[in-house]
Amino acid sequence: MQPQDLSEMVTNTGAVERIWLIEIQAAPEDVDKIIDSMMKVDPLIYGRYKRNAFVSAIGSETYVPQGNSTSAVHLDAENTTQTFPSVLIVVSVEQTGDKLERVLDAIREVHHYEEPLIFIKDCWASRANYDPRNQNPNRWWNRDVHEVTA
């Protein structure tokens, strides 16, 4: 299937923009360090918000180190199953200039793995027609305070 160019798509409620979607597997305790490092080179903008990231609930990452891996050298863990808590951090950056390179370097600089699990997707992101005074009853600011959850 051929990729579709959505750059001219405009709807009643907004448009779309090309972005790099970056997924990073990391230790839960390293989330802020990784996001803060990325923020030094890119504001992680999504709409009118910066430092925008999704962090999953804690899951498990599992692997078997090969003999030439850092885990085999430092933990004597060659050919043994390793399982550790892990989260998925998801961010997006504009597809302009050298942003992707700078963000990848920022992640690798602070990630605790010698080979961080980083996945990059070429995606389109929604961009809404923004109006902070929109009267749409579905917007959080127009709901009864008891309906809003953190």
Image: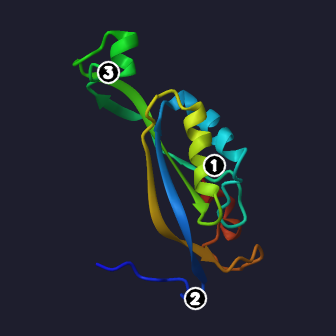
Mark 3 Cα-neighbour bin, 10 Å: few <14, some 14–19, many ≥20: few
Q: Secondary structure at mark 3?
A: loop
- Residue pointed to by mark 2: 10
Give the residue at x 72% y 65%. 48
Residue 77 locus on image (x, y percent): 30, 14
Mark 1 Cα-neighbour bin, 10 Å: few <14, some 14–19, many ≥20: some
Which amino acid type is shown beneath numbered disc 3?
Asn
Picture mark count: 3
Which amino acid type is shown beneath numbered disc 2?
Val
Q: Earlier in the sequence, mark 1 or mark 2?
A: 2
Farthest residue to the right: give it. 133
Residue 125 locus on image (x, y percent): 54, 70
Which amino acid type is shown beneath numbered disc 1?
Arg
Residue 111 against residue 136 in the figure, above or below:
above
Q: Secondary structure at mark 1?
A: helix
Residue 107 locus on image (x, y percent): 57, 40
- Residue pointed to by mark 3: 68
Closer to the eye: label 2 or 3? 3
Residue 64 locus on image (x, y percent): 26, 25
- Residue pointed to by mark 1: 102
Give the residue at x 42% y 40%. 117
Query: Quadrant of residue 38 in the image?
Result: top right
Q: Confirm whether residue 13 shows in the render.
A: yes
Q: Are marks 1 and 2 in contact (CB under 8 Å)?
A: no
CA separation in Å, label 2 and label 3: 51 Å
45 on left or right of 1: right
87 on left or right of 9: left
